[in-house]
Image (spheres, rainbow, N blue to C red):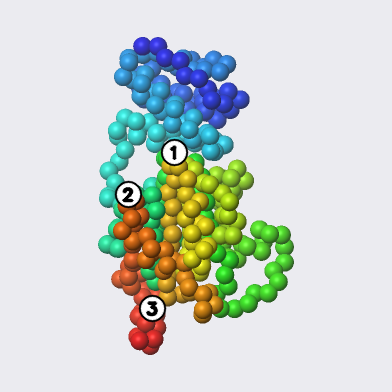
């Protein structure tokens, strides 16, 4: 069988073929096909089934290059294994992220329900006390979807509300002013992928970390959109955020209803939305408990002590 594949970006053949055509050699050896590169296309020849598999690998590689500068040898190898059905066995709920040899696993039954909800729904709300992995697992799920080409972008948003203290004037440009509010999202990202990769993705707008106020007027397709600290939104802000959801996108909303930093007379948009949207098809509501806290062992004791005193 002979097959020709058009190159989507002929000027980036080095990224697709690899240094000294290393990526093409890996595909040749894996499927026993003959591959010849031309100016703006590749010619494949060999057994029909093997040519089809090699073409599937090349298609996934070209999809990766739409959103990143380079395809690594490891990514080529993983793609070949995926196409040949030789991917290693994973436990249910495992999340495959960019960091080499790193798999994120739910550690409690509640976290497992959360991961399953994100996988099976376009809109997931997750509430729970500090340390239950609400933000961390959401970022991990988003990174996995991006890695496997199921989305093109990750948008991480957070309301710029101060936690009980006034920071006053902050120096620097806009990014410097909002960075303190967005730091927890950056921390989670750097656990999922190398620093240089995060930087490259942000420069190319593959990953965007922004204050909630900057979401107005946008429609976000082919994306994972995460709203963190959602208990600090008003109902109107929550409505604005939820209506940004575009085609082939997922939205994850996380928050801790016990840590609302809004003025006392302002209702929380998170609590309001969970009441309004309960029972709607395609929307998942997950409530994590103290038993799902996975930070330092003292965190669970601290949460318990404060809840008893408040009661």
Cα separation, mark 3 vs mark 1, equals 39 Å
Q: Which mark is residue 120?
A: 2
Q: Nearer the viewer, residue 20 or 40?
A: 40
In the rendered image, the vertical position of residue 46 relative to residue 174, given as above or below? above
Q: Nearer the viewer, residue 280 or 134?
A: 280
- The residue shown at (38%, 31%) is 80
Identify the image quadrant of the N terminus: top left
| Circles 2 and 3 in contact, beta carbons < 8 Å | no
In the rendered image, the vertical position of residue 256 relative to residue 186, given as above or below? below
Q: Residues within 10 Å of mark 1 (few under 14, many from 20)?
A: some
Horizontal placement of 218 versus 175: left or right? left
- The residue shown at (33%, 66%) is 287
Picture quadrant where residue 164 is located: bottom right
Of labels 2 and 3, the one closer to you: 2
Cα separation, mark 2 vs mark 1, equals 17 Å
Farthest residue to the top: give it. Answer: 1
Q: What secondary structure is found at the residue carrying circle 2?
A: helix
Residue 125 visible in the current orientation: yes
Upstream in sequence: badge 2 or badge 3: 2
* Residue on which the image places disc 1: 149
Q: What secondary structure is found at the residue carrying circle 3?
A: helix
Residue 104 visible in the current orientation: no
* Residue on which the image places disc 3: 303
Q: Which mark is residue 298?
A: none
């Amino acid at each position: 069988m002979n097959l020709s594949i058009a190159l989507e970006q002929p000027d980036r053949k080095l990224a697709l073929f690899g240094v000294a055509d290393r990526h093409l050699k890996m595909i040749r050896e894996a499927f026993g096909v003959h591959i010849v590169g031309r100016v703006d296309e590749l010619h494949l020849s060999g057994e029909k089934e093997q040519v089809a598999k090699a073409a599937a690998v090349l298609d996934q590689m070209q999809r990766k290059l739409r959103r990143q500068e380079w395809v690594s040898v490891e990514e080529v190898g993983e793609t070949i294994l995926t196409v040949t059905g030789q991917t290693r066995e994973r436990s249910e709920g495992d999340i495959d992220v960019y960091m080499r040899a790193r798999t994120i696993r739910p550690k409690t039954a509640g976290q497992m329900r959360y991961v399953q909800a994100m996988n099976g729904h376009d809109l997931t709300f997750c509430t729970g006390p500090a340390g239950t992995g609400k933000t961390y697992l959401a970022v991990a799920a988003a990174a996995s979807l991006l890695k496997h080409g199921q989305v093109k972008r990750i948008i991480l948003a957070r309301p710029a509300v101060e936690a009980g203290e006034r920071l006053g004037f902050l120096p620097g440009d806009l990014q410097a002013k909002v960075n303190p509010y967005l730091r927890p999202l950056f921390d989670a990202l750097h656990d999922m992928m190398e620093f240089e990769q995060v930087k490259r993705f942000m420069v190319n707008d593959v990953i965007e970390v922004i204050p909630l106020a900057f979401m107005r007027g946008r429609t976000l397709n082919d994306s994972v959109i995460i709203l963190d600290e959602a208990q600090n939104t008003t109902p109107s802000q929550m409505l604005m955020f939820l209506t940004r959801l575009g085609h082939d996108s997922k939205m994850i909303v996380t928050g801790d209803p016990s840590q609302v930093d809004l003025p006392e007379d302002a209702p929380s948009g998170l609590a309001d939305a969970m009441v309004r949207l309960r029972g709607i098809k395609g929307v998942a509501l997950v409530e994590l408990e103290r038993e799902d806290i996975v930070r330092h062992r003292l965190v669970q004791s601290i949460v318990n002590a404060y809840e008893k005193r408040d009661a």
